[in-house]
Image (cartoon, rainbow, N blue to C red):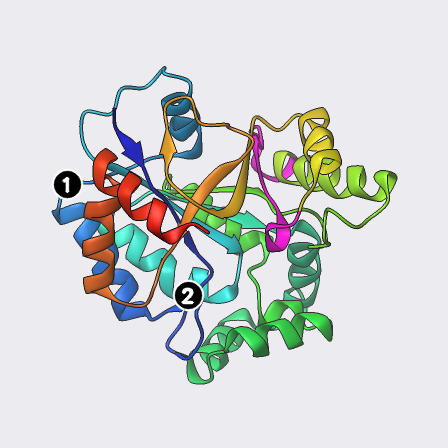
Amino acid sequence: MPVLPVLMYHHVSPKEGDMITVTPSTFEAQMRHVKDAGYRALTLNEVLDFIGGRLELKEKSIAVTFDDGYLDNYIYAFPALESCGIKAAVFVVTGWLDSATEANSAIDKRALIEEFKNRPLTHSEAKQLIEKGFYNRAVIDWEMAKEMEASGLVEFHSHTVSHKNCDRIPDGELLTELKGSKEALEARFKKPCSFLCWPKGRYDSKALDMAKEAGYKGVITTKLGVVKQGSDPFAIERIVVKDSLQWFKARLKVYTSPLLSEIYLKVKKP
């Protein structure tokens, strides 16, 4: 029975030094390996079809995901995805994109991008800019998202409206976070937004019930694991990707093997 690793990325940036950043050269090499080694990159709907037994995987397969929609995803990750023809999903915080779009309407975005290339951000610096309200210097705007989506390679789904902890906010506010982001994405892209990724991986049973009520068909977590036929579509597990091509090659062999992944995850999981 095939198994499927859903890969989790955050930053693709030359600014090394944290656990959730992969450098552009490493990311491109990883995507090139996916292509050259014959792995199939699935859309999230295909992941759901695999879980439900509606899709038979005849080749080893993966899914590529990004959390938060950082500006470096557009500058560095998107060209590599295009070059290698790899499909990916990005979970965006729609309120952040609204604010970035408003700020970018009054400036020369080309200059902003050149400035970013000259001084790329660490994850900590990106978080600080967001906290101070400088969203456009840290995350993509709607125009960038539409350009990425128009390639036919990148799909966008919900990471809520404002990235709040979904296990800590009142019911009404939580429902607004879940429904508001879904509606915003559907209005922008004129297609269903069927997937939610929990900010910081935080949720509880109430939040999960509300995600189902909001109309999501699948929910992505930060929990370690691979996807199998019959997996819970509302608790999709992922693999955090490290900034190493050798690590990547070795882990894809492990996480696309039913036997090796089972043995390895028994050791890795607490």
Image: 85 above or below 103: above
The residue that appears at 43% across and 33% down in the rendered structure is 44
| Label 2 with label 1: CB-CB less than 8 Å | no
Q: Residue furthest bottom?
A: 118
Residue 95 located left or right of residue 36:
right
Q: Amino acid at mark 1?
A: Gly
Q: Secondary structure at mark 1?
A: loop
Q: Amino acid at mark 2?
A: Ile
* The one of 85 and 47 positioned closer to us in this rendering: 47
Upstream in sequence: badge 2 or badge 1:
1
Q: Which residue is mark 2?
A: 75
**Position of the N terminus by quadrant:** top left
Q: Quadrant of residue 54?
A: top left
Q: Secondary structure at mark 2?
A: helix
Q: How many marks?
A: 2
Q: Is residue 181 magenta?
A: no
Q: CA distance from mark 2 to mark 1?
A: 26 Å
Q: Which mark is residue 117?
A: none
Label 2 neighbourhood size at 10 Å, few (<14), some (14-19), many (20+)?
A: some
Residue 141 located left or right of residue 122:
right
Q: Is residue 189 magenta?
A: yes
Q: Quadrant of residue 46?
A: top left
First to last magenta residue range: 187-202
Q: Which residue is mark 1?
A: 38
Residue 262 located left or right of residue 11:
left
Which mark's residue is nearer the viewer, 2 or 1?
1
Position of residue 165 measured from the top left corner of the image (x, y, whole percent): 72, 53
Position of residue 17 measured from the top left corner of the image (x, y, whole percent): 42, 79
* The one of 8 and 82 positioned closer to us in this rendering: 8
